[in-house]
Image (cartoon, grey):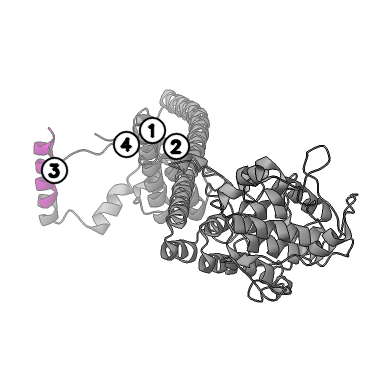
Amino acid sequence: MVKHSTISEAYALLGLEQDSSMEQIRTAYKQLALRMHPDKNQGNAEATAQFQQLSEAYNVLQKHIASPPGSHGHWHDHYSDDEYDDDYDDDGDYYFYDDDDEYEPERMRFFMFFFDEILKGRSGRGYRDSYHRRPRTPETPEEYEARLQRAREEQERAEARRAQQKADRKAFEARMREKERKEAEERQRAKAASKKADTENQRKKAAQTAQAQQQRVQTLRSATFAAARAGDVAKVKKGVWEDEVDPAGGEIKTGCEKFAVTQPDDPEETLLHIAARKGDTELVKWLDAHSADPEEHNSLGLSAFHIALQQGHVPILTHFFESYNPKEDDHNAIYSVPPPKSLLSIALESAEPEIVWMILDRGLASTQDVGNAWTNVTSLEGKQALLRKMGNDGMKYTEVQNLLMRYGEFTPPPTPEVTSQDRTRSSPHSSCKVQAPGGSQTPRRGGSRPRGRVAPNHFKTNTHASQAQSSANATPPMQNGTANISQQSPFNGERGKGRGRGRGRGRGRGRGN
């Protein structure tokens, strides 16, 4: 059999007063049922029992509110509340009986008797009313006292149950709140841990992406530099234009050092340096027009102009002179060299008289530079080194010596008198040496003003007027053993091109990789 709560206990279980409306009963039931629902408290037998009790109490109160007064029958008017309570058991519950029980035969006899009474006319409204209006048997004082005592005890038990249920409900709600708090904290910790893990994964992924990008950039850059060294102009242009390789800077890009397969001999050598060293004028112009920086220096402090000057590439030098006026201060970084070197000393390394003339004619060598070059060229060791670079071409050496004498007002000393035996043993160019009284080589200054752009440095010597005149009439450099006719433009009219367009600085830099 299944027990059901009484009306008073149903109100108490829902935490309501007995005069509460149906709306209040429905609201209280929804709140408590939502909190005690088995789906929300899985595995909690106590919560399931509480939910069943709440549902049972709600059904009892719903039927109680929906039933109109007097619907219990006429017998309700004749019996008191105490008598009505006697129909319940000690726990205040009434019972329902299943159909299949031990009293089935008695029921059958009752229904047969009831049917027989109906057939005999002893049933109906009048008969029933007359039966219910029969006087009751008066109860004795002892029975009355016993009934009152039972009612008081039942009321006390009901109050005790209500108090216990209220305490249990409060304790259960406290446990539920604590459980929800712990679950919320656990969810918060899990959420924070998941967020932290996602952040770490994103950081690792970003780092891997950055490393892959750096490796790709360095690989493309190294391939472009290798193509420049191999003379593959098309691949160099493709790397700069399509692969976005920055033509400025050295081969190893900053931050990509560990991805370089091979280390270059000069980490600061740029594509412009390589093109200038190989004498590729077209590539030099193209790189200069695509964000290459002509002011960058290699590890020796030399720019691409210095490399072209050292290698003797006249077209590249002409391009620099036309594009970047050496007389403008904005282009000092292109032409300045670290001491003790000078543009004239670098030009002498090319062993080409035309290169030396380009520096002297544009006034890019000071008087001190010319004096130092004269001392070096006329010394025995310097002369031998220069002749080796010239392939022992005495004509070129003479042209260089004449240029220095012309722009520095130097004159050789009188040719010493020698015997035929000494003339046979002397070298073909021994007459070009200037001998000081002590036997050392010294520069001498003639009496006329210098015809070049170099300011004289007034070397103090005692020379003959004819020697000064020969210095003033010194011939320009010779091409293929033949002197040019015009002294103003001894090299096919190339004098004055250094004044150029002067495009200046401000081109885009830092483009690409």
Residue 344, disc: none
Image coordinates for residue 492, horizontal then vertical, percent: 63, 75
* Residue 5 at least partly seen: no
* In contact (CB < 8 Å): disc 3 and disc 4: no
The residues tagged by marks 2 and 3 sit, at their Cα atoms, a distance apart of: 34 Å
Image coordinates for residue 465, horizontal then vertical, percent: 88, 60
**What kind of element bears circle 2?**
helix
The crowd level at tag 1 (other Cα within 10 Å; few <14, some 14-19, many 20+) is many
* In contact (CB < 8 Å): disc 1 and disc 4: no
The quadrant in which residue 505 appears is bottom right
**What kind of element bears circle 4?**
loop
* Left or right, 308 with reference to 486: left
Residue 94, disc: 4
**What kind of element bears circle 3?**
helix
Q: Nearer the viewer, residue 317 or 111?
A: 317
Report the mark closest to the observer, 4 or 2: 2
Residue 92, disc: 1
Q: Is residue 170 above or below residue 261?
A: above
Sequence-wise, the earlier of marks 3 and 4 is: 4
Image coordinates for residue 424, horizontal then vertical, percent: 61, 45
* Left or right, 8 with reference to 438: left
The residues tagged by marks 3 and 1 sit, at their Cα atoms, a distance apart of: 28 Å
Disc 3: which residue: 110
Residue 9, disc: 2
The crowd level at tag 4 (other Cα within 10 Å; few <14, some 14-19, many 20+) is some
Q: Residue at horizontal 38%, vertical 39%?
A: 51
Sequence-wise, the earlier of marks 2 and 1 is: 2
Sequence-wise, the earlier of marks 3 and 1 is: 1
Amino acid found under the numbered disc labelled 2: Glu
Amino acid found under the numbered disc labelled 1: Gly
Amino acid found under the numbered disc labelled 4: Tyr
Q: Nearer the viewer, residue 45 or 235?
A: 235
